Amino acid sequence: MARKTGTKSSTSSTTTGTRGAWRNWAGNVTARPARSVAPASTAELAEAVARAASDGLRVKAAGTGHSFTAVAATDGLLIRPERLTGLRAVDRAAGTVTVAAGTTLRQLNMTLSAHGLSLANMGDIMEQTVSGAVSTGTHGTGRDSASLAAQVRGLELVTADGSVLTCSPREHPEIFTAARLGLGALGVITAVTFAVEPEFLLRAREEPMPFDRVTAEFDQLVTENEHFEFYWFPHTTHCTTKRNNRSAGPAAPPGRAAAWVEDELIANGLFQAVCSVGRAAPGAIPGIARIAGRALSARTYTDIAYKVFTSPRRVRFLEMEYALPREAAVAALRELRAAIERSRLRISFPVEVRTAPADDVPLSTAYGRDTAYVAVHMYRGTPHHAYFAIAERIMTAHGGRPHWGKLHSRDAAYLAGVYPRFGEFTTLRDRMDPEGVFGNAYLRRVLG
């Protein structure tokens, strides 16, 4: 149902004049909004959108800035999420939980755990807001369980005229279908309802594996494990594999000291040092990569799901990720390896490979096809254009779809060819936001 809000809330939404520059997590995107607002309620947010539209300002909502693209950048009104947080409802009979849009995935998972509940799957970091994560297609890896957007069962959305729309498979189903992954182009999400299930344990098995074995057994590894991913270290034959499967328990989490060594000292502290040395002396990278590829040892542990899915990520980087038909993943990865070996590139960051089942979200990178994701990274401050251009040529040759929140050079003409329902989405966008209130330069490039 839609409702129009025009009454001023009794609590201030902390609108300011110019609050200076907004920057994303990686530091590669900067925006200077004309004004900012941090609403504490849906009514305050709706009022701010209506006022900005009447003043001729574009409107964008920013989460925690974990997108590498300028999807949230604006020179008009910037909506900040920090006060629009918290649990709204738990419906155990329906198997759903509703939270305010600015709630971070960390807060969501801790709240779910306190209620004995869990998401079926998620990505490997918890810093994003729920609205930012679903709007840009954040995903983990899974044989059967899909992205966060595919786990959404309802949305509350502020539209371009300040109306508040509640949508689900039963209410405004056309809008719900598209807005689950809407890039902020259809409106500002103010609440998200997720499908949840009873909390469960995952048994994690992490171990090194040679590149040739991983690629030869890729299909088997994906089929035999609920959640499989691996990292290949360029300039080496080393990979690190991760297999996560549900367990009846008991829980056997890694010891505090062991977890600190693996997740903080090696995965963050040592890796930060390796990347810093590589940036200063690129010629040393192949030798360092061979050492880094051997640094993480095999380990097995069992813990509640979100603690297994996620890891601390403190080393800052830039990233490009493409979603390929799953059957093309190994060929594309081998082509990428050969291209790096032929070039003079020196790559200190591992290449990450994950999977997802086909889903029905129109702009999902996994729409209509079983998918493999290939992600390339470069340490922040290191030239990345040449490497990313090589990777992108390979991925697009296989019909790849770029992650909406990660760097790429594709435009609407290309994207219309790889998304069967692209025209349906843009037609809905034009109907819901004819004046382009929620537009910006990035959306004009990727949506037309």
Image: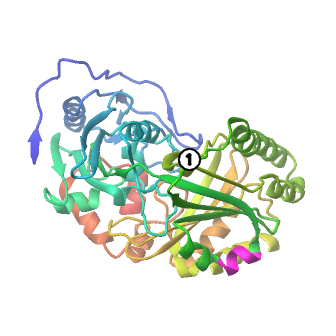
User: Disc 1 marks which amino acid?
Assistant: Ala
| Residue 347 placement: quadrant | bottom right
Residue 201, percent across and down?
A: 50, 52
Q: Which residue lies at the image location 73% right of the left edge and 49% below the top edge?
A: 382
| Residue 426 placement: quadrant | bottom left
Residue in front for this viewpoint, 141 or 64: 141
Magenta: main secondary structure equals: helix
User: For residue 196: magenta?
Assistant: no
* Residue beneath disc 1: 251
Residue in front for this viewpoint, 303 or 238: 303
Query: Left or right: where does residue 207 sit relative to residue 102?
Result: right
Residue 20, percent across and down?
A: 47, 26
Residue in front for this viewpoint, 77 or 424: 424
Mark 1 burial class by Cα count in 10 Å: few <14, some 14-19, many 20+? some
Residue in front for this viewpoint, 157 or 148: 148
Q: Which residues are magenta?
A: 212-217
Q: Which residue lies at the image location 34% right of the left edge and 27% below the top edge?
A: 83
Instruction: Inspect this view and state whether residue 437 appears.
Output: no
Q: Is residue 76 above or below residue 67?
A: above
Query: Left or right: where does residue 25 sit relative to residue 105?
Result: right
Q: Which residue lies at the image location 73% right of the left edge and 36% below the top edge?
A: 257
Residue 341, percent across and down?
A: 81, 72
Q: Quadrant of the C terminus?
A: bottom left
